[in-house]
């Protein structure tokens, strides 16, 4: 039985054909969807605010402590952000906004980074969440 080994030039040609195929395929993948135009730099997407899980929650109650008293009981940590969540019914929008602004001012005066998240809902509600997110605004910035 005679065994013939492939010539070295045949192996080189097969390798070059495979390389050519892969280069062509990758070039087509890059150009797909550009209609022959050079790819443009895409604008960076705006990043949604990162809201971490709450370490503590505050809900205003006339029989309970004020927000500044409640914050005084929390350990001082520059990484902590107080987020005021205000949900409003259409008829109570102005009042909920004033309440949220008052809570935000009170927290800002206590030295915490503050942000306010307003959203429409069937019923009005307001509460504050203390969490370790990246602060959105500088705590010394006035509202």
Image (spheres, grey):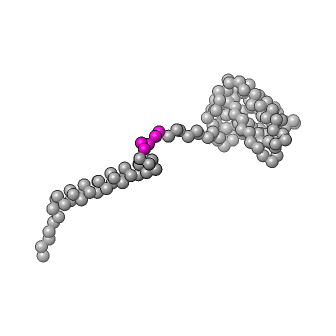
Q: Is residue 9 above or below residue 93?
A: below
Q: Residue at x 65, y 40 (%)?
A: 51
Percent position of residue 96, x then y: 81, 37
Please tell me whether the stretch drawn in magenta is mainly helix, strand or loop. loop
> Which quarter of the picture shows residue 58?
top right
Q: Relative to the observer, which residue lies in front, 72 or 43?
A: 43
Q: Which corner quadrant of the image does residue 115 belong to? A: top right
Residue 40 falls inside the magenta stretch: yes
Q: Residue at x 64, y 41 (%)?
A: 52
Q: Which residues are magenta?
A: 37-41
Q: Residue at x 12, y 76 (%)?
A: 1
Residue 122 percent across, percent down from the top left? 80, 48
- From the image, which quarter does the C terminus lie in? top right
Closer to us: 76 or 126: 126
Callout count: 0
Single out the residue that lies furthest toward the left. 2
In the image, farthest residue toward the bottom: 1
Residue drawn at x 74%, y 25% is 109
Where residue 64 sits in the image (x, y, percent)? Answer: 84, 36
Compared to residue 6, the image places residue 21 above or below, namely: above
Q: Nearer the viewer, residue 95 or 100?
A: 95
Vertical relation: 19 (above or below) 61: below
The quadrant holding residue 94 is top right
Q: Position of residue 87 (x, y in %)?
A: 77, 42
Q: Is residue 3 magenta?
A: no
Q: Would residue 94 be visible to someone looking at this image? A: yes
- In this orientation, which residue lies closer to the viewer: 88 or 23? 23
């Amino acid at each position: 039985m005679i065994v013939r080994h492939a010539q070295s030039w045949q192996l080189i040609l097969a390798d070059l054909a495979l390389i050519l195929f892969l280069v062509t395929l990758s070039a087509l993948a890059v150009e797909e969807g550009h209609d022959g135009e050079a790819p443009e730099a895409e604008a960076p997407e705006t990043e949604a605010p990162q809201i971490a899980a709450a370490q503590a929650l505050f809900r205003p109650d006339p029989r309970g402590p004020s927000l500044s008293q409640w914050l005084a009981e929390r350990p001082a940590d520059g990484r902590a952000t107080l987020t005021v969540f205000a949900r409003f019914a259409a008829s109570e929008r102005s009042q909920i906004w004033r309440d949220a602004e008052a809570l935000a001012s009170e927290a800002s005066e206590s030295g915490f980074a503050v942000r306010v998240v307003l959203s429409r809902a069937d019923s009005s509600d307001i509460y504050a969440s203390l969490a370790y997110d990246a602060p959105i605004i500088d705590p010394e910035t006035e509202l």
